[in-house]
Amino acid sequence: MLEINKFDRIIVANWKLNGSIDFIEQYLQELNCSKLESSNNCGIICTPSVYFHKLVGRLNPLFLGGQDCSNYSEGAYTGEVSATMLKDASCQFCIIGHSERRQIFGQSNEDVCIKAMNLIANNINPIICIGETFEEKNQNLTKDIIYTQISKSVPKNATKDFVIIAYEPIWAIGTGKIPSLEEIDNIHFFIKNEIQNIENYKILYGGSVNSNNASEIMDLKNVDGVLVGGASLDALEYKKIMNS
Ligand code: PGA
């Protein structure tokens, strides 16, 4: 598994249910990986798994990531993709517990914990997503929600050397709204300092990140990078965020 401590910033592109072979060819051309400035940043491109083979060996110095993995290792589970299969397909990171998987597909914290264990067993770095709804924020429940999500979805054998946490307020995803910089730094401070066994984990911020706001967000003391959805579908925009 990749040691993540050596990186200054981690910048994840989450393509969600987007892409095609033509799209990938154009994206790679615009990204021009061989010309990417070498830096201590870790760029991870999370695509639908059917396209991994089109990206393997062509992303260096960036890494390939998945967007979910099965709770199961093998067997009669139609439609699932296991952590072992992701590993076989050269995937080095995997997002789990994204709010879209939790809300639309009913994944629980316990599911996320099993997925994280499966990934760790296969030497894939998990990126565990957490975050509150707008209602929860308005009821001042953000820290309680996050505390529960983290306590239940981060497995006991996880360590800060290889597990990443992404704080993504659900109301900020795809909406163009983001919390104030102070709020982001505050929540990240809380996660890094006030949750037992999670001290000093790498914490990414996600939700409406683009090239205009990435730099001020990543400059915050307790932010170690960003998870980018919509804006990451534009290779040039993603490159700008990498260089912010
Ligand atoms: P967004 O998505 O950047 O489009 O808000 C972020 C995410 O869902 O990970």
Image: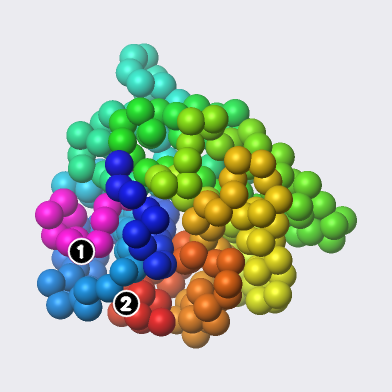
Q: Element at badge 2?
A: helix
Q: Residue at x 55, y 67 (%)?
A: 223
Q: Which amino acid does label 2 sit on?
A: Lys
Q: Answer with the quarter of the image where residue 34 lies.
A: bottom left
Q: Which amino acid does label 1 sit on?
A: Pro
Task: Please check the rendered image and state whether residue 205 is part of the magenta-colored stretch, yes or no.
Answer: no
Which range is magenta?
Answer: 55-66
**Front residue of this view, candidates 120 and 193:** 193
Query: Which labelled disc corresponds to residue 239?
Result: 2
Q: Where is residue 177 in the image (x, y as percent from the top left)?
A: 65, 73
Query: How packed is label 2: few (under 14 Cα within 10 Å), some, or many (20 or more)?
Result: some
Q: Where is residue 66 in the image (x, y as percent from the top left)?
A: 35, 46
Residue 29: in sight, yes or no?
A: no
Badge nearest the viewer, 2 or 1: 1
Q: In this view, does 178 lie above or below 137?
A: below
Query: Which labelled disc corresponds to residue 14?
Result: none
The residue that disc 1 covers is 61
Q: Element at badge 1?
A: loop
**Front residue of this view, candidates 140 and 108:** 140
Nearest to N terminus: mark 2 or mark 1: 1
Quarter of the image for the N terminus: give it: top left
